[in-house]
Amino acid sequence: MAYINVSGTGNFATLQISTATITAFTATNDIVVPSMQNITVNNANASYRWKQLDSTSENVITTAATNQVTTNIVLDPTAFFGDGSGDVTAVDKGIFKLSNDKVQVYFRVYWSGTGQGDKYVSGTGFISGVAPTVSADQPIWVSPLTIDVVGDYTQGTVA
């Protein structure tokens, strides 16, 4: 049995966010979200259940799924506020402006690295759930980050 290892060198789970379709791993115009503390890829298929008088068991069918990618991050000023070089790419805008301006983003979650043959899921969605916090017991800014997915995920392998 094999496992998806994320603890070895180059085997890290990675989240890439872009304002354009992602065709390859690149940090040039895309945000490679730094300092993730965790990540969850949620594919919650809903279901409808009903009972019939002629059966001793329930019936069930699946309905539309609610898909989300959630993570908690330690804030990096460039990734969060943008690099200030313009207002076109994800790197220019930063996570906060992408969320605040309600920009539809493209994303890829790489499961255990970004090299050839590594697996990913991708899709489009909107960044929500950004809520930076800091305290005396936690003297660095951290924030949850959610991508509410529009439609289905696509899975692939890095070429």
Image: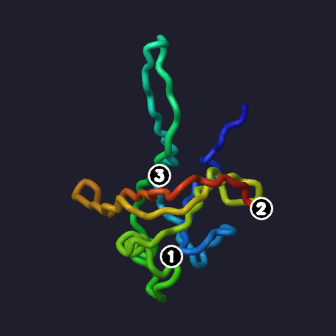
Graded by Cα atoms within 10 Å as few (under 14), some (14 to 19) or many (20 or more), the crowding at tag 1 reads many
Task: State how far apart marks 2 and 1 are (Cα).
Answer: 23 Å
Question: Quick one: which residue is furthest to the front in this view?
Answer: 54
Task: Locate residue 134 relative to residue 43 in the image: left or right.
Answer: left
Ranked by sequence position, the earlier of labels 3 and 2 is 3
In this picture, is 63 found above or below 67? above
Q: Is label 3 in contact with label 2 (beta carbons under 8 Å)?
A: no
Task: State how far apart marks 1 and 3 are (Cα).
Answer: 19 Å
User: Which residue is labeled 3 in the image?
Assistant: 68
In this picture, is 70 found above or below 100? above
Ranked by sequence position, the earlier of labels 1 and 3 is 3
Q: Amino acid at mark 1?
A: Ala
Q: Amino acid at mark 3?
A: Gln
User: Which residue is labeled 2 in the image?
Assistant: 159
- Looking at the picture, tell me which residue is in the foreground, 134 or 81: 81
Task: State how far apart marks 3 and 2 are (Cα).
Answer: 25 Å
Graded by Cα atoms within 10 Å as few (under 14), some (14 to 19) or many (20 or more), the crowding at tag 2 reads few
User: Which residue is labeled 1 in the image?
Assistant: 90
Task: Locate residue 16 relative to residue 134 in the image: left or right.
Answer: right
Residue 134 locus on image (x, y percent): 27, 61
Which of label 1 and label 3 is nearer to you?
3
Quadrant (top left/top right/bottom left/bottom right) for the N terminus: top right
Residue drawn at (50%, 64%) of the image: 33
Q: Amino acid at mark 2?
A: Ala
Residue 6 locus on image (x, y percent): 61, 47
Q: Quadrant of residue 81?
A: bottom left
Which of label 3 and label 2 is nearer to you?
3
Residue drawn at (54%, 63%) of the image: 124
Residue drawn at (57%, 59%) of the image: 123
Task: Locate residue 21 relative to residue 129 in the image: left or right.
Answer: right
Ranked by sequence position, the earlier of labels 2 and 1 is 1
